[in-house]
Amino acid sequence: MEGARWTAIVCTCQNRESANAFRKELQIRQKKGIICSGAVIMAVDDPKPNIGSGSATLNALISVTEYLAARGGHKVVTAEVLYNARILILLLGATFPFSPCGHAFMPAPDKASSSPSSEGTGDNQQLDAEVTMNIDRLMENMMKLSENSPPGLWIASTDMILHHPHPIKPLDMSDMKDCVCALTVKTTPQYAMKHGACKISESGEVSRILHMASEEVIKSWTKADGTCDMLAGIVYVGPSVAKSMVYIHTVPPLDACTYFGLDNGAQPLSLSLFFDILLCMTADIEEEEFVSGQSRAGPAQQSSAIMRRARTHLWNTFSGTKMRAARLPQTCCC
């Protein structure tokens, strides 16, 4: 079997108008056989603009879980449906006046592979006759990477462009069922300082992650070959962890990350996927450092009372979860 079959592909969008457009784009690819005909296609508009990648992910996860539960005959939202599902959430990120479709639908630097894929009808050759977008190549990469993965949730940012000179290979996901796996790439210290750098322990766990880390920190994380590890914007979340992510939307103030809370009058709460939700899973983070917001790069950020409550609940829920790293060989991000 070459490539994974998705139960659902969900893209997050900043507003309903763009959600309708992006849903149609994915449906076009499904009709061409690039996406499996049995996959559920969803485009979920964020509860509010600039809600953050973490809040957008939680909102999309709840939406697709609700749909799958209803399709399975459940009368209430149950995250049990996640144990047999393979879900891909595409974070479409920000749009700009000069690029209204964002990075997802900009032309890719090179073509997606034209090799047949069992995700669709083996008709990926059609991509070669058209302009290949970044989202096309990303979905092809995701099919290969997740080929051997157990059921669970995959989250991929479309803002990152993965470049690999050789065909990408499936990851070994044999022991990832009950944990989180962050994909990383090797890069220069100078480039890592501008993005999300991470420190990986000898056992393969993610020890720390920092956004725009200082030169001093990056130097201490630099390996003997002169490179650093950088987040590739792709994460696998095991079903049990994804289940916990679904249910935290019932707890204030985290309900304000989703349409549930906003429909009940809550003020929107903006969370980052990596630097709020996943950060508390890193091995070396301490509770007060995380809850206070001091774990972000740069000067310590004093959290509001609401953010402290949100981070406290995130810590109580996820701090015992292991986050492992999977390095993508011969791959770079731009």
Image (cartoon, rainbow, N blue to C red):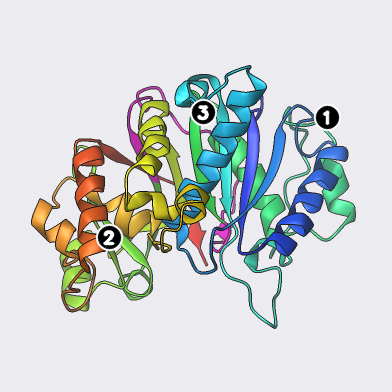
Position of residue 128 relative to residue 323, above or below, is below
CA distance separating discs 2 and 3: 49 Å
Residue under circle 3?
Answer: 77
Compared across the picture, whether 288 is left or right of 204 comes to left
Could you tell me the amino acid type at mark 1?
Thr
| Magenta span contains residue 135 | no
Query: Residue, x 65% and y 45% (percent of image)?
Result: 139
x and y percent of residue 298 in the render?
Answer: 21, 77
In the displayed structure, 285 sits above or below 143; it is: below
Find out whether the residues at labels 2 and 3 contact each other: C-beta distance under 8 Å. Answer: no
Mark 1: few, some, or many residues within 10 Å (few <14, many ≥20)?
Answer: some
Q: Evaluate if marks 3 and 1 touch, with contact meaning CB atoms under 8 Å apart.
A: no
> Quick one: which residue is furthest to the bottom in this view?
98
Q: Which residue is the site of mark 2?
A: 225
SS at mark 1 in the image: loop
Three-letter amino acid code of the residue under disc 3? Val
Q: Residue at x 63, y 25 (%)?
A: 70
- What's the distance in space between the residues labelled 1 and 2, CA to CA? 43 Å
Q: Which of the pair 330/203 is nearer the observer?
A: 203
On the question of residue 231 being in view, the answer is: yes
